[in-house]
Image (tube, rainbow, N blue to C red):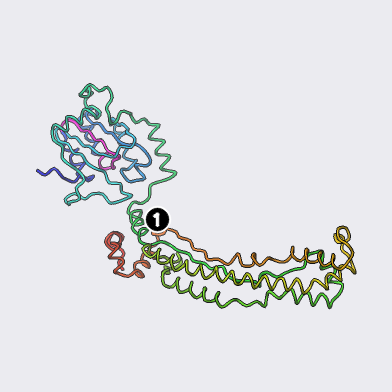
Amino acid sequence: MPLFTTLDNARLALEISRAGSKVILAAPGTSHSVAQALVEAGKRLGVENVQVVLDVSASVARLGYGEHGAVAMLKGGGIALRHHAGLRAGVLICDRQGWSFTSTPRLVEADAVAGGEAFNAIALTEAQIIVLRGELPATGGAVAPESALEPIVGATEVDDATVEKVTSALAMAPPQAFDLARRTQVYAALIEFVELKFEGFNLQSRRVRLPKTLPMIASKDRTLKARLSASLKVLDNIEKPKALKDITDSLDELREAYLIPVGPAGRVMLKSKRDEFEAELQRIEKALADCKDALLEDLKQVLDNVIASITPELARAVIADPPPRFRGLFQANEESAADYVREELEKAFPSAETLVEGMRIHRFYKDVTYETLKNKEFVARVLSVIPRSVREGSLLDERVAAESGITA
């Protein structure tokens, strides 16, 4: 008889139902079907002959090692239930037979299927069973072999307060649907959402207004006011550099090449292409930095010219009708008036650095989420736009399409 075997929930329940004298189960968690088999074994053999050790915690339920409702079933059935934090190995002993097995965290992969070759258990020898019983809770009220007062595994009894605490925790943060969570992992390894934005050159939104200390002067001379107004609109006449258009075109081409539209959810990119995408994007960002440097010099010149062109007339107006701050701090001459005007204009005018600092490329990466994959239209769209060779190479069809019932 082979030592390697498979213990799924149905097989566990079957072996427990066949036990004629005692049952000991130690595992991270257990299912409703196995818990029901243990309760029935307790009725048949006596609850003192059925011992169960679990990791009674919210993490076990969230990882999918077991169902927390099974704990309540065992407690309700009078089964002696003990707790061992962090227990991940499994042991089942039924009379003189036993198995060591691994439970499947269903958040990561599906349960082992009996009859296949995905073995998750090894049959134990009689000698191994004797040694293991010495480290597990004793059945029938007997003292454990090797005279240990407390078992090494499962020394803590599970009380009602512990069960209620875990129940409340799972009510506030329940486990995910495990089949969907597993699919999320496969998709998240293959694709990611990418948002690519360009905040460009927009001087039209930066109209220059004279400070409150100067319009009161300009408003008394309509001709002067008209000339000032024309000068302050000079930024509107600055054209976007050709290099900036080339950058915009390059970004559009990059977006078209790598970012796949998948409807209202946005655009996704193959994770395997991120390095190539970033390399091209960095070249575009370098071109943008060069463009900003050139534009910065042009803007500084334009702003300096505007201030220089309107300062003389405003200075003469200041001499003719001195504002309070000028009267209190400056000498009443044209040179001081010009200094005053330049100071006030520099406060009101944007700096060239401010005008170009907003020119930048934004990219945001976000993984595919559990909630996203609830949208079947999104899944169908992804399967339709990703090339078949990529889907097959990443095992997307094998791991996801068949399980979800969606075909490309």
Q: Tell me the kind of residue under disc 1.
A: Tyr
Q: Nearer the viewer, residue 288 or 72?
A: 288
| Residue 55 percent coordinates (x, y) | 32, 37
Tell me the quadrant of the picture where the C terminus can be found. bottom left
Q: Quadrant of residue 22?
A: top left
Q: What's the residue at 41%, 69% (across, down)?
A: 258
Q: Quadrant of residue 370?
A: bottom left
Q: Is residue 33 magenta?
A: yes
| Residue 247 percent coordinates (x, y) | 52, 73
Q: What's the residue at 52%, 66% (across, down)?
A: 361
| Residue 227 percent coordinates (x, y) | 79, 77
Residue behind mark 1: 370
Q: Nearer the viewer, residue 69 or 385?
A: 385
Count of labels in the image: 1
Identify the residue at the far front of this view: 335
- The magenta segment: 20-36
Image height of 60 relative to 96, above or below: below
Q: Nearer the viewer, residue 33 or 212?
A: 212
Check disc 1: other Cα within 10 Å, few if <14, some if 14-19, many if 20+: some
Tell me the quadrant of the picture where the N terminus can be found. top left
User: What secondary structure is marked by label 1?
Assistant: loop
| Residue 312 percent coordinates (x, y) | 82, 72
Q: Is residue 291 left or right of residue 42?
A: right
Q: Quadrant of residue 97?
A: top left
Image height of 180 relative to 213, above or below: above
